């Protein structure tokens, strides 16, 4: 049954010249980055505060030092490499079939794999800016800081990631909606589709080839034209 469904996806890909991929944490788990909501995910670990609280804008403002202690330990992963899913998506883009890659991830692995048209809904750990003078800093400045990373001007350096209580970038959202609306084939993978407003973006797809690849059940399973309940690596390694 799985092989049959993968063959359908392969056929759809071969027939489509405008493919859009919408992905979440499950894309990067096989690179060694844990997801958030699975049994072994970040949200099931025990901390002094719930991770959702620590990763909120108000907590960042009130408890900046504690925020960075958690952020450096749990949100930054060294020596991780793109996996088969990242590489296959980059290959599809290189062939001119994949027109946009929309991700909820902040790890930058899609770009490391070679993808160029990547729309990062939640930002990236690789970009950091001074809150006062807007000076740019790499991730090394965050990792090397003793406590709170500070700019040369004295301002606090903040990661360019969307925290809870913060809105998504309007330009990125508009580009994502436009890409999804125009998509011939929409592949949704490695996401629980439970984080809004990001998850709601796939509702803008009006075609008849939406493939949903995810290990667990999602709220959009019944809306998928092709539902593959399996790991992305298992599926993409056969494409």
Image (cartoon, rainbow, N blue to C red):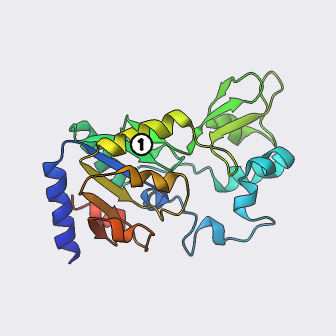
Above-or-below relation of 15 to 235: above
Where residue 107 appears, x then y in whole percent? 52, 47
Please tell me in which quadrant of the rendered image residue 143 appears: top right
Residue 217 appears left or right of 163: left
Q: Quadrant of the C terminus?
A: bottom left
Q: Nearer the viewer, residue 58 or 85?
A: 58
> Residue placed at 79% from the left, 64% from the top?
49
Q: Residue furthest right?
A: 62
Q: Which residue is mark 1?
A: 177
Residue 112 shows in the view: no
Residue 79 shows in the view: yes
> Residue placed at 79% from the left, 49% from the top?
58
Crowding at dot 1, Cα within 10 Å, few <14 / some 14-19 / many 20+, comes out as some
Where residue 68 appears, x then y in whole percent? 76, 48
Where residue 156 appears, x then y in whole percent? 79, 33
Q: Nearer the viewer, residue 74 or 21?
A: 21
Residue 153 appears left or right of 179: right
């Amino acid at each position: 049954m799985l092989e049959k469904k993968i063959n359908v996806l392969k056929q759809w890909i071969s027939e489509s010249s405008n493919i859009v991929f919408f992905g979440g944490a499950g894309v990067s788990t096989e690179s060694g980055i844990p997801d958030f909501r699975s049994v072994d995910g970040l949200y099931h670990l025990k901390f002094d505060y719930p991770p959702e609280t620590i990763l909120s804008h108000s907590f960042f403002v009130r408890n900046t030092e504690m925020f960075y202690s958690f952020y450096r330990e749990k949100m930054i992963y060294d020596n991780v490499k793109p996996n088969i899913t990242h590489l296959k998506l980059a290959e599809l883009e290189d062939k001119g079939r994949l027109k946009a890659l929309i991700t909820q991830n902040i790890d930058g692995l899609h770009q490391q794999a070679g993808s160029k048209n990547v729309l990062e809904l939640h930002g990236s750990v690789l970009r950091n800016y001074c809150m006062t003078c807007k000076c740019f800093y790499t991730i090394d400045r965050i990792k090397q800081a003793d406590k709170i990373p500070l700019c040369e001007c004295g301002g606090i350096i903040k990661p360019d990631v969307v925290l809870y209580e913060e809105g998504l970038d309007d330009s990125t959202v508009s580009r994502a909606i436009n890409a999804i609306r125009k998509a011939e084939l929409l592949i949704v993978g490695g996401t629980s589709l439970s984080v809004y407003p990001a998850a709601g973006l796939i509702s803008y797809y009006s075609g008849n080839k939406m493939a949903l690849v995810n290990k667990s059940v999602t709220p959009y399973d019944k809306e998928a034209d092709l539902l593959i309940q399996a790991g992305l690596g298992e599926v993409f390694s056969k494409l």
